[in-house]
Image: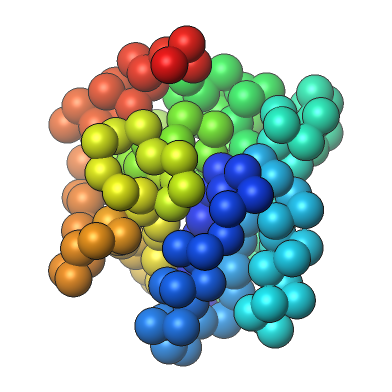
Amino acid sequence: MKIFVTSDTHGRLDKVEEIWKRLTGVDLVIHLGDYQKDAQRLERLLETEVVSVKGNMDGSYSSDDFKILETEFGNLLLVHGHMHNVKLSPLNLIYFAQEQGCKAALFGHTHRPCYEESHGIFLVNPGSLSQPRDGSEGSYGIINTSPECFDCSIVYYRSAKTQKQSARPGEGRLRRMLNYSDRF
């Protein structure tokens, strides 16, 4: 299964639409919050299924605002991340994913991309195409699953090449992502 993952569009879908025109073979689109109305609009514009969750800017302050997506690889947890304090530490999200029987946790909220494996859970944040906070012009994720494989590519908007990040913990990407403050 090939999945296009985006997050934190905040009402600006122009880059998502532009990228969609270049993609092929996508089975599903995931929108990880802020704004859920963007996900509904994308479903109409792209004429494909969009699975979405609410974010903090959608008024979501319930720990029940998550979805579990069943794939041939295993279950994927979909959250925005604000209720799991992902800006402080990934541990709450990791524990929650484990409790839900998920092999991966997909989240947004930080506007910074990451792809790592920690405590047996793949952590994926596609970053933000409309309001990136990593100095880039935005990013999104492409996930490919099979019964024996979970592979994610973080793709940067202005880059012609796909930036694959290894799933080795402790390389510092997640720590840099989590140290970013909302005050900016």
Q: Is residue 38 above or below residue 55?
A: below
Report which quarter residue 42 is drawn in. bottom right
Report which quarter residue 29 is drawn in. bottom right
Where is residue 152 drawn, in percent x and y?
Answer: 35, 60
Where is residue 59 drawn, in percent x and y?
Answer: 81, 29
**Residue found at x 26% / y 44%:** 136
Q: Is residue 176 above or below residue 27?
A: above
Q: Quadrant of the C terminus?
A: top left
Where is residue 83 drawn, in percent x and y?
Answer: 67, 23
Between residues 11 and 6, which one lies in front from this camera angle?
11
**Residue found at x 57% / y 18%:** 85
For residue 56, side relative to residue 77 (left or right):
right
Report which quarter residue 111 is drawn in. top left
Q: Is residue 44 above or below residue 140?
A: below
Between residues 114 and 37, which one lies in front from this camera angle?
37
Q: Is residue 28 above or below residue 40?
A: below
The mark tally for this picture is: 0
**Residue found at x 43% / y 88%:** 24
For residue 113, side relative to residue 26 (left or right):
left
